Image (cartoon, rainbow, N blue to C red):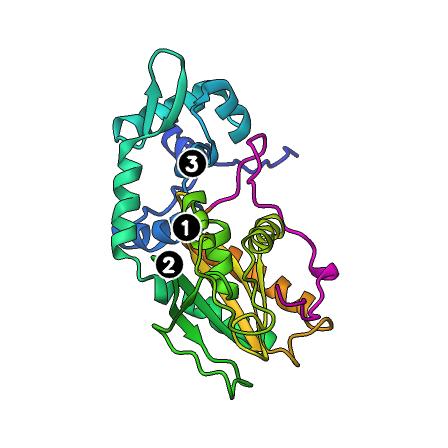
Amino acid sequence: MANATATQPVPSRRNQAASTVPPVAPRQTAETATSTKPAQAAQRPTQTVQRAFALLDLLGQADKPLPLTELANRAGLHPSTCLRLLRTAGAQGFVERVGSSGHYRLGAKIFTLAYALERQMDIRAVVRPVLRRLSDAINESASLVIRLEHEAMVLERVVGKGELGFQISVGARGPLYCTAAGKALLAFADPLLIDEVLAGPLPRLTAATLTDPVALRADLDDTRERGYSIDNCEREDGLFGVAAPVWDAADRLVGVVVSSGPSERLNTATLPQTIAALLDAAADMSARLGHTLPAAGDAPPSRPSRSPSTITTDRPAAR
């Protein structure tokens, strides 16, 4: 008997082609595109922009124009990538090439922006939260003080929870030679101003007031060396204060941050903690005002800080 075999239908070439074509992904509509791309862009900052800002930051920290190779090394970029970014920034005025030396520096556009920021910035609003944090940390009053001619003036102040007897308001003024704020302002001022103040008169206000120009100059030298000043009841009996300088983007002295309180609370047990908080606040204010530390390889600032562990609050002999 003949074997019966089932015949299979042979697909046409058209059907074969259709069966091998991969499925087509659904077309992305304008609505879905706009809903996903912004979110992705927000999550991934543009690398080119980051690199360009990094180069501007490096140029801003340097004390002199930098060659292309050094800039590329510091930024971790290939020299050709670094050069392309510098040319783009230079076309907008943010970077300048110095002659034919291949060195680069910040351009005039940066100065324009910095001046605009200075006009727009309310320094009191900038430092107020830092003063509040400092005051809360040490439970004493904290102030930002600036210099007006031969006087120190309180520009902004946060009153400590424990302040009772010593009431100092915004706008109050004091001498430069016998207050923590005044001595910090004077220590980092022009030497000519120091000479003018030390020439007197230097009236004695308490038994601890330094009225000897030689002793006062030595005290100012100590202030510069350790990075903060100390008023050990030199203006008012029972009032102790410390102050540290605040700097802006151009490394100019803006003012000083001051912490003050009764001498029975600010003593050898609490002073190291107070000074640590004070220096942190001064650094925070300076950073908010655009001040930056030198880049690696640049000369360090000539404002070293001495540890407060050796400070004593014993009242010095009258001089």
As drawn, 300 above or below 82:
below
Residue at mark 2: 150
As drawn, 173 above or below 1:
below
- Mark 3 to mark 1: distance in Å? 34 Å
Label 2 is placed on what type of residue? Answer: His
Q: Position of residue 69 (x, y in %)?
A: 50, 18
151 sits left or right of 238 in the view: left
Which range of residues does the magenta coloring cover? 292-319
Residue at mark 3: 60
As drawn, 122 above or below 73:
below
Residue at mark 1: 196
Q: Position of residue 295 (x, y in %)?
A: 54, 36
- Mark 2 to mark 1: distance in Å? 9 Å
Q: Position of residue 197 (x, y in %)?
A: 43, 54
Q: Confirm whether the magenta stretch covers residue 297.
A: yes
Q: Are marks 2 and 1 in contact (CB under 8 Å)?
A: yes
Q: Quadrant of residue 89?
A: top left
Please tell me which residue is depicted at 56% across the width and 51% down the height of the picture.
Answer: 217
Q: Quadrant of residue 60?
A: top left
Q: Answer with mark 2 or mark 1, whichever residue precedes in sequence.
A: 2
* Category of crowding for the residue at label 1, using alpha-carbon neighbours closer than 10 angstroms: few (below 14), some (14–19), many (at least 20): few
Q: Confirm whether the magenta stretch covers residue 315.
A: yes
Q: Nearer the viewer, mark 3 or mark 2?
A: 2
Q: Answer with mark 3 or mark 2, whichever residue precedes in sequence.
A: 3
* Category of crowding for the residue at label 3, using alpha-carbon neighbours closer than 10 angstroms: few (below 14), some (14–19), many (at least 20): some
